[in-house]
Image (spheres, helix red, strand yellow):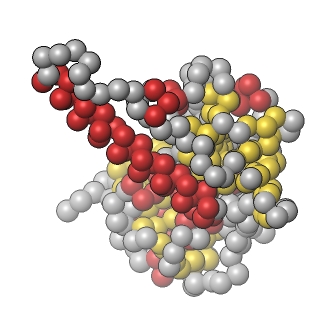
Amino acid sequence: MRRPILTLTTDFGASDHYAGAMKGVILSICPQAQIVDICHDVTPFQIAEGAYVIAQAYDCFPMKTVHVVVVDPGVGTARRPILVEAAGQYFVGPDNGVLSMVYARGKHKVRLIANDRYFRQPVSATFHGRDIFAPVAAHVAAGIPPSRMGKPIEDYLRPEFAKPVRSGERTWSGSILKIDRFGNVVTNFHVRDFPELYRQLAGESAVHKQSRARHKQSRAREQADDSFGAVGGPLPDGRGSVAVGRGSIAVVVTVGRRKIAALAQHYAESRPGALFLIVGSSGYLEISVNQGSAAKQIGCKTSEPLKLTLG
C-alpha cells in the first residue's frame, strides 16, 4: 500500500520552529506519511503569492495527496478553516483566498472544518497551522473521510487577484504574483486570457520548432557533405531561432515608470542586463533579465500594480 503524501506550503521560512512543529504533529497522527516541502518562503502575509505557488505545484503530485497551505495573516480572527476536494486531491488551509487558484480550475467541493475532535488541543489563537490544519490534514491522509471534518459550504472567498481587470480598450490592470529567487517578476497576466497574444505566441512557437528541426537537418546534411558550407545558411535573425514579439501585436508591461516591451522565447535570446518579457512555465507573463534580477533592476516587490497594453 502506498504511503500517504502530504505537502506543506507556508510563509514560515526556515529560521523558526513553525514548519518543524507542523511536521511533528502530522507524523504523530500519521507516522507513515511522506512529507514534501513545496515552499516555506512565500513572502510573509502575501496570500496571492501563496495561491500562485500551490497552483503551480499540486498537479505534479499523485491522486489523494493532501496539501496544507498556510499563509494566514488573519489567524485567530473570524476567518474560517476549510478543506477543499479538487482534482482528486485534498487541500487544507484558511478561507482567505490562498486556495482560490485551485478551486478556480474546475470541479471542486469546499468544506468548513468544524469538527474539533480532529484538532490539536488546546488550539492556539496564533498557530492554526500546528493546531488545526496539520492535524486535520494528517487525519485525512490516515484515512478519515473528509465528510467528518464538516459540511460543504458555498460562501467561501473567491478573490479576484488572479485575474487582471480591463482598464481601457487595449489595457489591463494587474499585479505581481511572485518574485522568484532568480528575480523573475511573475505577473498575473496569463497568456490564455488574451486570445490574440496566445495565438501569436503559439504560432511563433511552432515556427521556432520547425526552424530548429530544419536547422538540425541542415547540419546533418552539411556534416555528410564533403564541401564546407555547401548546404545551409542562417535561420531567421541569424541566431538559430525566430524572435518572438515581431508579429502583429505589440506587448508592453508597465511597472511604475518602467516599460518593458521586448518579448523573448527563452532567457538567452536577450542580451545580459536587458529587461524583457517571457511566458513562464506557468503560462503567465514574466519580466526577466538574462543572468540577472529583473526585480532588483526595476525595484519592485510582490503585489505591486502593473499595466498591460496590447498594440
> Which residue is drawn at the image coordinates 74% and 53% (left, top)?
311
Q: Is residue 172 above or below residue 11?
A: below
Identify the image quadrant of residue 131: bottom right
Horizontal arrangement in the rendering, residue 14 relative to residue 74 (left or right):
left
Quadrant occupied by the N terminus:
bottom left
Q: Is residue 153 left or right of residue 105?
A: right
Decide if residue 304 is in sight here. yes
Observer-nearest of 215 and 40: 215
Q: Residue at image x 84%, y 62%?
A: 167
Residue 26 in view, yes or no: no
Residue at position x 59%, y 49% from top? 247
Classify residue 35 as left or right of residue 204.
left
**Where does residue 157 sit, x and y in percent of width and height?**
71, 72
Q: Is residue 87 above or below residue 124?
A: below
Can you tell which quarter of the image residue 293 is in? Answer: top right
Q: What residue sits 68% from the left and 76% below the top?
A: 156
* Above-or-below relation of 290 to 99: above
x, y percentage for residue 103? 56, 71
Front-lying residue, 121 or 118: 118
Indicate the position of residue 5 as horizontal and vertical percent values: 36, 56
**Above or below, 296 relative to 159:** above
